[in-house]
Structure formats: C-alpha cells, structure tokens
Image (spheres, helix red, strand yellow):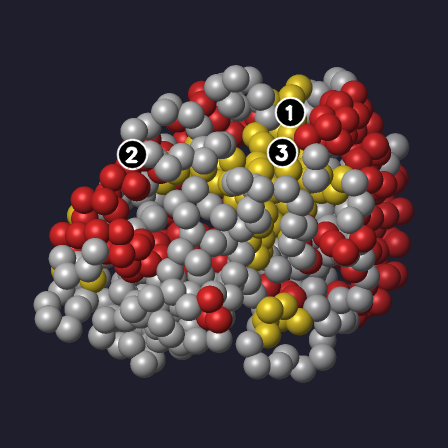
Amino acid sequence: MKHSLHNRESALIDSRFSIVYKAARMSLTDLSDIQGLIHHSYGYSKSRHLLFEITSQEAGKRLLDYLAPLTTHAMVLPAAKPSALLNVGITYKGLEALRVAPRLLKFFPSEFREEPNKQTMGDLGLSDPANWWNGKFKTEQIHLVVHLYTQSLEILDEVTADVRNAAIGCQELRPTREDRAIEGGWIDNTPGELHFGYRDGISQPTVRWNDAPLQQGEIDYRHFILGYATQKIQSAPMILPSSPDSVLATELVRNGSYSVFRWLYQDVALFNRFLRTEGPRVFPLLPPKDAEELLAAKLMGRWRDGTPLVESPDAPNTLLSSSNSFGYTGDLNGQRCPFSAHIRVVNPRDQALNPTSAAEEIPRVIRRGTPFGPKLTEEEDDQVERGLVGMFICASILRQFYKLTGWMKVNDFSPIFPDQHAQDPLANRSSANTTTPFLIPTEQSSQNVALHNFVTTKGTAFFLLPGVKTLQAIAQGKYQ
C-alpha cells in the first residue's frame, strides 16, 4: 500500500515539477500561511511556552489538528488585539515522531537534524547541555512547542488548559524548578525592559516581504522564510534538479522558518555588583551612578534607554532612544562604542570585515522574546530564576544563528579588533582560547574590565515554525 502510494505521489510530483519549481521562485504573497510570530512582534504582556514530547503519532496528529486552525498567522495584525495568540514549532525529532517520511527528512540541513552544538554556541561550564532544562529531561525529548500570548493571566490559564486537554496522549515537559512551563512577562508592566535594565526590541531587520527591488536597509525575506531558495540565498530543504522528493520536502517547509529557542538565566545581582565596583574605577571623574550607567552603556553599545553610543557618547538622549540608522566608520578607534560591545558584535553595520567573514552578508536574525522572573534591583542573589526567553528566527541556523554565536564567542571577524580573541560581554566566558578582559578605549588610555558569566544558558532547542497549511497537512498524514 505504501509503495503504490509512493508511486502515485512520485508521478504527480513529476508532472508538477516545473510548475512547483517556478512557484518556489515566485514572490512571497500568502501571509496567511506564515506564522505571525515570524512577521511581526506581538506586544502582549504575558506568554507561556508549552513543551511536549509526542509519545504516539496519533496523539501528535490530534494535537496538530487542534492547533492548526488556532495558529496565529501574519495577517492577524497586533492592532486587532485578539484575546490570545498561538504559534507552533516542531523539532526534527518531532517530525520523526509524527512519521514524516525519512526520504523527505533527509533534505533538512544537518544543523537542524543534530542536537544544538555547544562548542559553536559557547555553551560550556554551567551552560553545558548536560545542565539544561534544570536536568528534568533531555533536549532530544522535546518534539513540539506551543507559544501562547495573552494580556491577562486568566486568559493565559484558560488557553493553556485547552491546549493541555488537546495534548492528551502526549507528555508535557515542564522544566522549571517548580515543575511549571516556561513563562514570560513584562517587568513592572513595562514593554521592552530587560532584567539588566536595557531596552530591547529596537534593532530588527527591515524585511522586504515580496520580490520588489530592495530599498536601502531592506533584507530579502528568503533570509527568514523557507521554500523560496535561490542560488544566491540558499536554504534547506530546497528543490534539486531531478529530485521529486526534494520538491515535496520544499513544499513541506514553504512559508516556514527555523526558530532557535533559548532559555537564558541572567545573574542580575552579579551584574549590579559589577557595575557598582567597576564603573567608578573605570570612570573615576564621574559621579558613581553616572559611572555605572556609562559602563553599562559601553558593554551594550547603547545607553540603557536605547540611545546609541556612537550618536551620543556622553549621555542618553530621548530623541535618539529608538535610533537605528547609524554606523561605526566614524568610530574606528572604539572611543565612542567599544569594539566588542554587544550590538557592535552582533550587527557590525558598515564596519569592515575580514575577507573570510566578508564572503557572506552580515548575518541577521529576527528576534522575539520576553523576560521571565521578578525584577531584582539589589546586589544579593535571591535564588529566584529570572532572565530571557528568546527566539532567533532565520532560514539558516548555520549561516545566521551559528555565525552570530561564533562572532560573540571570539571577536575575530573584523580587522579593528586589537585582540583577536576578545569576547562579547554577554557571551559565555568559559569558551576556550578567549580572553576575559573587555577593552574600553579612551582618549587617555585604554581600560580593561574583567568580565564575569552574567548569562547562563538553561536550554536550547531548534524548531521549524511550519506554514499553517503544513501544520494541517502533517495532521492529515500527508507527508508520511
């Protein structure tokens, strides 16, 4: 039976091959098939991320059958403010558990098929995968995630209960110390504020969502959306000549994206102590609080309100707090923004790159995320879990996410670095062959600040955020 079905399917694919191939090269127009989380930020104050292990194919298909029509797509704009938003991701192991045919799964890139690479990400020491998910389960057990967003805890609990009821037959994986799902929420009901005090969500790629000519600063949607690969902008699965199975695999991922889900602990008490002790030492002519704020700005590359250092090096400027149109060619000595400041590492903008790094475009990802845990302003650790739930959305984990983590781990991608082994201040300082000091160039003399592990990885999983049609098709067993 399976063999005859495969033959009929192959014949159908052969007859459609040229049509589908042309379609894959056409403009992206069906925003109703793209999960809304990819296309735009939601701006909802509450979130919950339910992780499931699919213990039987039938249970998994029933869950997808329930989730598919509820999945928020890109045509649902934030202004509409529905009571709840829902998105779905499936891991490679999840696709296997759902019995997607191996002949299609082989077209997925190796970095998605494999476990997250701790060396590439710099997840060593306390961040080692052996410690992830509070030791309650292994990453390979995660098959599916349901992202929920609401404006109230009551509605969040109602929607959660509905999803859990639909997931009967699957095993929910609860990673917190209290055996709860991962949750996110605005700090003090303030959107965009993070636990280290920085404002988030300022710099996002400006995506051209169709094939009209790119305008200045725009990025082709193929860097984020699967199923439309070209020779210039490749992603996998992609259509290969004389390979009918590759056509079906490309159809499976069309209008989807890869999402790197990161659960990160932030040691706020340590960060606060660091600023208080090191700020006045590095900037002794400033009042202590001003010195702390300047050091915080030097680490990030922006003042904590968002003002870029290269545009306002001496003080925050509310008129510039959302500025994103600046470069670094006017700051080649790093006296305004240090070379290894976080935003200068993850987006060097117009800064020169070494030939090996310049061979490809600067990697950009779409970032989604919220803080979790209560606010802490003190310098003593209260032993409460707090940090960031982040999603890094792209069409190539290798060329985009892994490349960025490599740059963060070892700052060697530009000729401006006087120390070719420096690190992003928010990178794991356990990485091998890197230096602990953070260089702050000044007009008088450069200062070195000894950094700590302010951030610890608590878990990472790679998901496919499928198109809505694909979710429905998998639920119906189409790709078996």
Q: Is residue 403 left or right of residue 296?
A: right
**In what element is the residue under mark 2?**
loop
**What amino acid is labelled 2 in the image?**
Glu
Mark 1 lies on residue: 53
**In what element is the residue under mark 1?**
strand
Image quadrant where residue 14 sits:
bottom right
Structural distance between the alpha carbons of marks 2 and 3? 29 Å
Residue 238 place in picture, x, y as percent: 66, 59
Instruction: Using a 10 Å C-alpha cutoff, classify the residue at mark 3 as few (fewer than 14 neighbours), some (14 to 19) or many (20 or more).
Output: many
**Position of the C terminus by quadrant:** top right
Who comes first in sequence, dot 2 or dot 3? 3
Residue 172 appears in view:
yes
**In what element is the residue under mark 3?**
strand
Instruction: Using a 10 Å C-alpha cutoff, classify the residue at mark 1 as few (fewer than 14 neighbours), some (14 to 19) or many (20 or more).
Output: many
Q: Is residue 390 left or right of residue 299?
A: right
**What amino acid is labelled 1 in the image?**
Glu
Q: Are marks 2 and 3 in contact (CB under 8 Å)?
A: no
Residue 1 place in picture, x, y as percent: 88, 32
Mark 3 lies on residue: 49
Residue 370 place in picture, x, y as percent: 55, 43
Q: Nearer the viewer, mark 2 or mark 1?
A: 2
Instruction: Using a 10 Å C-alpha cutoff, classify the residue at mark 2 as few (fewer than 14 neighbours), some (14 to 19) or many (20 or more).
Output: some
Residue 379: numbered disc: 2
Residue 459: numbered disc: none
